[in-house]
Image (tube, helix red, strand yellow):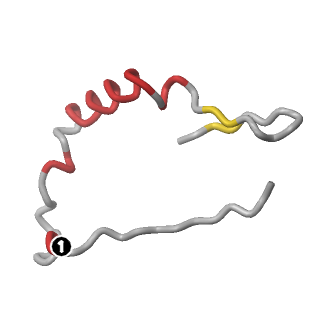
Amino acid sequence: MYVCMYTHTHTHTYAPHQVRGVFAVVSAGLAATVRMIPAYKMQVDARQDNGDMQPLTLYGYESSE
């Protein structure tokens, strides 16, 4: 998640301290621990061939200036 702050030239983009650095890594780790690390193993109702599938690559384009 990135928050854009525009100046008169519309060129400055920054990420607030909550989504970068050590704070983000520690808070994400704590959140995963509280949720009992849900991505650690495949879900019970997942397809049997799910582990054999290749990851999906998505491309995007933003045309506004």
Q: Name the amino acid type tagged 1.
A: Asn
Q: Quadrant of residue 52?
A: bottom left
Q: Quadrant of residue 30?
A: top left
Residue reaching furthest to the right: 8
Q: Position of residue 7 (x, y in %)?
A: 83, 33
- Please tell me whether residue 39 is drawn above or below residue 52 in the rendered image: above
Q: Which residue is mark 1?
A: 50
- Please tell me whether residue 27 is drawn above or below residue 52 in the rendered image: above
Q: Residue at x 20, y 47 (%)?
A: 38
Q: Residue at x 22, y 32 (%)?
A: 34
- Please tell me whether residue 42 is drawn above or below residue 15 in the rendered image: below
Q: Position of residue 11 (x, y in %)?
A: 77, 39
> The C terminus is located in which quarter?
bottom right
Query: As drawn, is 40 to the left or to the right of 10?
Result: left
Nearest the camera: 57 or 2?
A: 57
Badge 1: residue crowd in 10 Å (few <14, some 14–19, many ≥20): few
SS at mark 1 in the image:
helix
Q: Position of residue 62 (x, y in %)?
A: 68, 61
Numbered disc total: 1
Query: As drawn, is 29 to the left or to the right of 51?
Result: right
Q: Residue at x 25, y 73 (%)?
A: 54
Q: Position of residue 8 (x, y in %)?
A: 89, 35
Query: As drawn, is 18 to the left or to the right of 60?
Result: left
Q: Residue at x 49, y 26 (%)?
A: 18
- Please tell me whether residue 23 is drawn above or below residue 31 in the rendered image: above
